[in-house]
Image: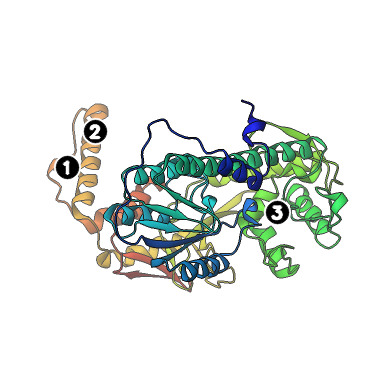
Amino acid sequence: MSTTGLGLSSSPASFIKYMENTMIQVPNGTVAPEIQGPVKYVLYARKSSEADEKQALSIDSQVKEMLAISEREKLDIVDIRREAHSAKDSGQRPVFQEILKDLRTGRYTGILTWAPDRLSRNAGDLGSLVDLMDQKLLRKIRTYGQKFTNNPNEKFLLMILCSQAKLENDNKSVNVKRGLRMRCEMGLWPAPAPTGYLNEKKIDRKGYVMVDPERGPVMRQMFEKVAYEGWSGRKIYNWLKFDMNFRSATSNKPLTLSNIYRLLQTPFYYGVFEYPTKSGNWYTGKHTPLITKKLFEKTREKLLRSEIKNIDKQFAFSRMIICGMCGSGVTADEKWKPLKNGGRAHYIYYGCNRSRDITCKCGYIREEEIIKQLVDLIGELDMDQNFIKRKFEEERERAIKFQRKFYGSETPNLSKTEFDPKQYSKHVLTQGTIEEKRELISGVRNKIVLRNKVITLSNQI
């Protein structure tokens, strides 16, 4: 028998009529006698926000229609359960799962719902319903125009209707992907326009984007400032937010720092795009490029150098101190100052990274001043004494081995030197390497706070 004869390719209404007129009769099949007493119904209303649900009644409308049926037919409704969730995947609807659990405990023996596809659009949840019917725990499913009981014909019709809903979902997914792929092959952007562009509103221009006359030129300047003037992402962020008052066309909010870095690495701006992301499928767009490929590559090169510099360079106290004014972390930067004699002076400054407050006025402090203040606070530092002593013992043992190897002997009483945690900590802060200083500070239990160029300690961990 062809699928057309079964009605699978026809509309749902005509297929239902076909099934009702040609019910399959099971030879020698008998249905278990229905349990006596009224059916206890749960009214279940569901609405998904997905595109394939645009034509479905709202949750309140479903409840209203089904309550009218229950009043007309004197149905016993125990509970009304509402859910806004897609039914495409099995076991993902918490309210529906609770209903299944209550059916197994006997709280309900029937379900009242607008249509079969409100209950299931996947095989897993449909199987759970049919199993409950087979176990005589679910006596009846009542919809707007039909009823389904533990009867072979009615269960078969229920499975067909829910399977048809799943087929429609699957087909729509395939068709949407096919449509997006075709649009990309035509050079049309398949998503909301990136910052600097606007989606065209005309129906016959779907997928076309045009340059945003207000934001497009600013986006071009953003690339130029990074490529030719060496601006950092943070400087671009401040420029856009405070100097340009730049706001996104969609959210009307300033761009975040992470969004700026993402846009600076988006090839769409010079005329090509990848879809889906990381698929390796590249397309040449029909939109007007804002920049050249050469400018894009130069921008990426500058960003890469900046990332390498930030990753490789390590400072003694960066990420070890908290800003006392806004709670952000404290970061470090180094400066080189030319001297009259031709040399250069090297300075390291610490200041708030402004991750919590871009306008923070914490100020900057030299590394030498931080060390001086920490040495003055040695007596107040709450340090792990066992950790400090272990590091001291390792240092002393290394010194003994060095002397024995190169001088054939060791300094008298070096092995008997008493451990003084304060003196050892001062030594590390003033003479230790960057790694040793960081290791020492990481063992401090106090919170180290910088405020107005002054280091203080807090007992809060």
Q: Which residue is mark 2?
A: 403
Horizontal side of 84 relative to 102 (left or right) equals: right
**Lower position in the chain sequence, tag 2 or tag 1:** 2
Residue 69 spot, x, y in % from top left: 51, 66
Mark 3 or 2: the one toward you? 3
Relative to 250, say whether 17 is above or below.
above
Residues at circles 2 and 1 in contact by the CB criterion of under 8 Å: yes
Q: Which mark is residue 231?
A: 3
Per the image, label 3 sits on a secondary structure element best described as loop
> Gap between marks 3 and 2, in whole Å?
51 Å
Residue type at tag 3: Trp
Q: Which residue is mark 1?
A: 414
Q: In the figure, residue 461 lies in which quadrant?
A: bottom left
Say which of 431 and 64 sits in front.
64
Residues at circles 3 and 1 in contact by the CB criterion of under 8 Å: no
Per the image, label 1 sits on a secondary structure element best described as helix
Residue type at tag 1: Leu
Say which of 44 and 209 sits in front.
44
Say which of 67 and 353 sits in front.
67
Relative to 292, say whether 260 is above or below.
below
> Gap between marks 3 and 1, in whole Å?
54 Å
**Lower position in the chain sequence, tag 3 or tag 2:** 3
Residue type at tag 2: Gln
